[in-house]
Image (tube, grey):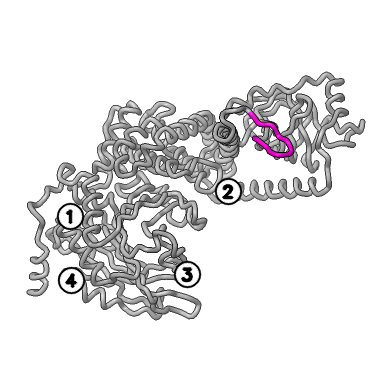
Amino acid sequence: MAALAEKTAAMSLKGPRIENSTEGWPAAKIRDTFVKYFQTQGHTHWPSSSVVPHDDPTLLFANAGMNQYKSIFLGTIDPKTKMATLKRACNSQKCIRAGGKHNDLDDVGKDLYHHTFFEMLGNWSFGDYFKEEAIKMAWECLTVEFQLDPDRLYVTYFGGDELKAPGVPSDEETKKIWLKYVPADRVLPFDAGDNFWEMGDTGPCGPCTEIHYDRIGGRDAAALVNMDDPDVLEIWNNVFIQYNRDKHGLKELPAQHVDTGMGFERLASILQGKMSNYDTDVFTPLFDEIQKVSGQAKAYSGKIGDEDVDTIDMAYRVVADHVRTLSFAIADGAVPDALGRGYVLRRVLRRAVWYGQHFLGAPKGFVFRIVPRLCEVLGDAFPELRRARDTIMAVLEGEERDFNRTIDKGARYFSKKADALPTGAKFPGGDAFVLSGSLGFPLDLTEIMAEERGLEVDVDGYHAALKEEQDKNAAALAKRKAARSAGADMTCAAAQTAALADAGVPKTDSDAKYVWNERPRAKVLALYVGRGGGPKGDGFVARVGPDAAVAGVVLDATSFYAEMGGQVYDTGALLSSDGEDAVRLQVDDVQVYGGYVVHVGAPLASLRVGDEIQCAVDYDRRTRVAPNHTMTHVLNFALREVLLGGLDGAKVDAEKTGV
């Protein structure tokens, strides 16, 4: 113990003790102190990677600080890159855990510590220092730089686990190092579930050591470590990547690495003397802005569970967390969408909208108005937020507008179905699927509405309906492929346009193609099954059924963009207009012939001339197409300006060509 006391005394505080408060440790100072400390220890400040891992298809979002260094750990990095020269690095990495293996979305708001977006402070060694230096720097950073009370810190190490990590010895080296700084009764062994890290079933792996902090102090809290006690929380994890696992077992790596991660928001709560991450200045400016924008009379008060009777505090946490996630994701190139990470972002936004409007009383179109304040709070640390501010606001405003078109309809649909249920019945999974697929209500929002009524959603039934829809879509796709392989000629020539004109069919009004995110109604004026088909051989029929491989529909008006001017056609669906929004035709191609717009695809239900339908363009796809079209014109303009001196064109002859 004498040696321990001597070691601790040697790490004396630098200057006077800083008060544990928002004024003493504002968020920017915490981030800056961490980075500067490790820079003095020879680390390169390597900026956070994009939260959207464009080059890593295995991840929806960056969810840990080590993601961008994976190629270094795997030994696959291009030696010509600047990153390949790194020996030591540090930063605050932007992370999102929503969707995929690591998903905290459904827990956000219910407690005081879950987030979908968070920052991970980290330092890394790539074949340079290892356990001795990593532990020393972690201890010094916490107890000297951040002035944490050493008596409140507990550390864990890998104590062996023949079941989960067979053949891996107990990490006695780490234990021995820690005993230089921490009394033996606060150096605790745990199994592989807590203290052994693996990138996957094979690949780099190794033991880790965690540092836990007791918020209460003045007691023995060893028994509360790793017990999910909110007052005894893990703040820093140091991973020692010393093995490689293959099908033959474990082998020592020739170059051993260190990968560490410390939750920024958790550290802020400790240094600012708060019992919750949400009470720090990371979130309080956002709560103030949310109250201002929503018009909510009650300020955030930090209640959870039964104490949060009206769910107002939970709603504050949901909105604040979700606007952070959405803003960083959009700034880094993602957008709410119908697939993959885009679908996750759409769920995040709609969850924020629902909680804000339903529990805070916010007006429609409020989430995007919080963005400017967020950019003020985090713009210095992450300048990309300021640069993308207008883009973030525009994307969120459009998405909110789309959801708000269906939110009232969805609530009415839910109420109608719930009111008809007998006592004790579950909310039907098929109806939950209609809310999700047709009205834009993710399953978790339906579960929230059900919970408010004391109902439970039939989740198994929901997934069964989802699978049925997926199977139906797969069958429709197979049918469309079969139609193409059968050589059905769906083009129209003079004979077809003349037949339409002779029948008195007016040309299609396509002005609605310039209006986005609408579902206008239209009337079926003609049905086309291809050249040579139909009773007259001109291809036109009075009815098509789901047994038809392919059909073309001519409407009196449409919001679909037909292929023209170098831009590809819209896709989407023609839906029933009876309120159920059932798909009548899956639109895979749109062409215009002599002013008649023909929507081509596989019928999924019967269609007759005279039917009324809704045009449902896939605006997510159009959102990706339109910028490419616009930038083509921009490129043409730039080429004319730069190469042709501003001329509108150039002659093409035997000696030269021009744009």
Q: Earlier in the sequence, mark 1 or mark 2?
A: 1
Q: Magenta stretch containing residue 625, yes or no?
A: no
Q: Which residue range is magenta in the image?
A: 649-659
Residue at the disc numbered 2 = 461
Q: Where residue 647 sits in the image (x, y, percent)?
A: 60, 28
Q: Where residue 67 sits in the image (x, y, percent)?
A: 41, 58
Q: Residue at x 78, y 40 (%)?
A: 550
Q: Where residue 201 is drawn, which disc sits there? A: 3
- Looking at the rendered image, the disc whose residue lies closer to the viewer, 3 or 1, is 1
Q: Earlier in the sequence, mark 4 or mark 1?
A: 1
> Looking at the picture, does residue 222 appear above or below residue 487?
below
Q: Residues within 10 Å of mark 2 (few under 14, many from 20)?
A: some
Q: From the viewer's perspective, tell me whether residue 249 is left or right of residue 319.
A: right
- The CA span between labels 2 and 3 is 33 Å
Residue at the disc numbered 1 = 146
Q: Residue at x 57, y 50 (%)?
A: 463
Q: Where residue 630 sits in the image (x, y, percent)?
A: 57, 33
> Looking at the picture, does residue 251 appear above or below residue 186?
below
- Looking at the rendered image, the disc whose residue lies closer to the viewer, 4 or 3, is 3
Residue type indicated by callout 3: Asp
Q: Are marks 3 and 1 in contact (CB under 8 Å)?
A: no
Q: Are marks 4 and 3 in contact (CB under 8 Å)?
A: no
